[in-house]
Image (cartoon, rainbow, N blue to C red):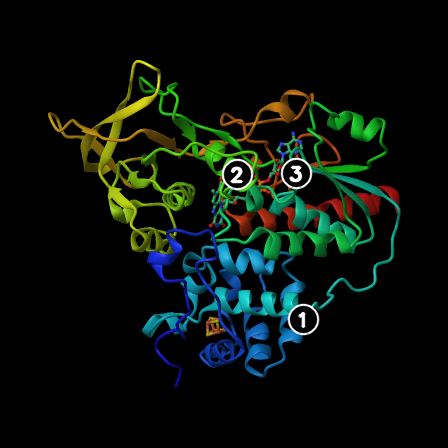
Amino acid sequence: MAMKTKVPVREQDPKVRATNFEEVCYGYNAEEAQEEAQRCLNCKNPRCVQGCPVSINIPAFIQEVKAGKFEDAAKVIAKSSSLPAVCGRVCPQESQCEGVCVVGIKGEPVSIGKLERFVADWSRENDIDLSGNIEKNGIKVGVVGSGPSGLACAGDLAKAGYDVTIFEAFHESGGVLTYGIPEFRLPKSKVVNYEINSIKKLGVKIENNVVVGRTITIDEMFEDEGFKAVFIGSGAGLPSFMGIPGENANGVLSANEFLTRVNLMKAYIDDYDTPIRVGKRVAVVGGGNVAMDAARTALRLGADTHIVYRRSESELPARVEEVHHAKEEGIQFNLLTNPTEILVDENGNVCGMKCIKMELGEPDESGRRRPVEIPGSEFELDVDMVIMSLGTRPNPLIASTTPGLDVNRKKCIVADEDGLTSLEGIYAGGDTVTGAATVISAMGAGRTAAAAMDKYLREKYL
Ligand SMILES: Cc1cc2nc3c(=O)[nH]c(=O)nc-3n(C[C@H](O)[C@H](O)[C@H](O)COP(=O)(O)OP(=O)(O)OC[C@H]3O[C@@H](n4cnc5c(N)ncnc54)[C@H](O)[C@@H]3O)c2cc1C
Ligand code: SF4
């Protein structure tokens, strides 16, 4: 009979971790992982696999963990995922594989994410090479963007023998994994860079500091550089703002800019050349994962930090685990609260934020109850920095420099279920197609497009 609860995972003490950028969760050791693996029923029709956007053979890898065959477990995962240590850490398992695990009906589901993370970390620590032998076909394929969609697409195409080059606008690779998700949730040098290097070992080349649409256009990639197909995985990095008075003041930032400065420009390291000024009292407007990351980062940089969110706790879009961690660390939640104006002092700096209390009315088109202002409930929040975390959209640069590439009303690239865009040989996937979503859905889109590109290229050139 399976234990009702998960084997607990060790974490850094909240009071200590609120002052450092080291990883919050320590993950399972081998004994803990084997004990947790015992809880899996090895179902004949495993619902967890259907819940996984890249269909990892979850019971098969868990059985290998149970038997102590960690390398074999890593091989099972490698068939479906090129970023297991990343996904084991940041995937919303509670709404995917673990959300449908049968053990979860009468108790807690199997801790699939933590087991995946254990296998990936063990594999890295033991330097297991999962690249295998690849027969090259010499056909050049270009990938725009080195986020999870681009990396997954590039990895699969390289395994199929193609000569793959990723063009990345930033000086470091990884997309949001590197410049968005903070170090304390996803360590860069230990985890992200290692998984990027595993993809490079397959023969994928990455050219950094290349802005496609400026340095080179997609048409030039075909005509001048000899690429036979291109995948666009350029993400959704353009932030939205509220359009309220005072938003142009010094001390108002988008969460993207704030997190990029801290993560990519290493502003969290004391004597680094690219520091950031963080207020003493910071409001982060929004309730998603990005808002939690921005708030927990500001807290670690010494600020008294508030989340300001217009709906109630049950509508918070962030992962439950992230909200729980944020609360444990001392973030204050101002729920059912909406900003109406940012107050600015005589020097143009933020000196407060006017807010109004909200209540929940009838459901809106998203099915969630619409927040409605409570008349006369205005108040001022005493803050000197505001971070806007209201969602992002794709940057229009690529669409505007690629004639014939269709985008929709939200400026997302239009692609069919295989990732094919309105142009022959040009595929797209991840956040640039769906709008801001998840690492695993971006990876899944990259893999789907890679399979379709392989079919197209075989029919045309091989
Ligand atoms: C702060 C934050 C926290 C998140 N937390 C989670 C989480 O916990 N779990 C989860 O599943 N998801 C999370 N997400 C969402 C997830 O990270 C994204 O859905 C995912 O990274 C999208 O992958 P992508 O490959 O489509 O794009 P991205 O990761 O955005 O990568 C796109 C890449 O393309 C590059 N690029 C853009 N334009 C060009 C150009 N013109 N030329 C060359 N390169 C270009 C960009 O520099 C970038 O490197 C989070 C997102 C953020 C911002
Ligand atoms: S659904 Fe749960 S118990 Fe069944 S195979 Fe998947 S992880 Fe194991």
Looking at the rendered structure, the number of numbered marks drawn on it comes to 3
Quadrant in the rendering for residue 116: bottom right
Residue 10 in sight from this viewpoint:
yes
CA–CA distance in space, label 3 to label 1 = 29 Å
Query: Given the image, on which type of amino acid does mark 1 rest?
Result: Asn
Do labels 2 and 3 touch, CB within 8 Å? no
Secondary structure beneath label 2 = helix
Looking at marks 3 and 1 on the same chain, the residue that comes earlier in the sequence is marked by 1
Residue 35: give x, y in percent of width and height: 47, 81
User: Of 418 and 167, which appears nearest the observer?
Assistant: 167
**x then y, percent, for residue 152:** 66, 50
Residue where numbered disc 1 is placed: 126
Q: Looking at the picture, which amino acid does disc 3 mark? A: Gly
Which residue is depicted at the point 54% across and 34% down?
Answer: 236
| Labels 1 and 2: the sequence-earlier one | 1
Task: Determine the CA span between mark 2 and mark 3.
Answer: 15 Å
Would you place residue 148 above or below residue 215 in this image? below
**Figure quarter occupied by ligand 1:** top right
Estimate how packed mark 2 is, as few (under 14), some (14 to 19) or many (20 or more) residues with alpha carbons within 10 Å: many
Residue 418: tell me if it is visible: no
Q: Nearer the viewer, residue 72 or 57?
A: 72
* Closer-to-camera residue (344/114): 344
The residue furthest top is 346
- Number of the label disc, if any, that sits on residue 145: 3
Residue placed under numbered mark 2 in the picture: 434
Q: Residue at x 30, y 55 (%)?
A: 328
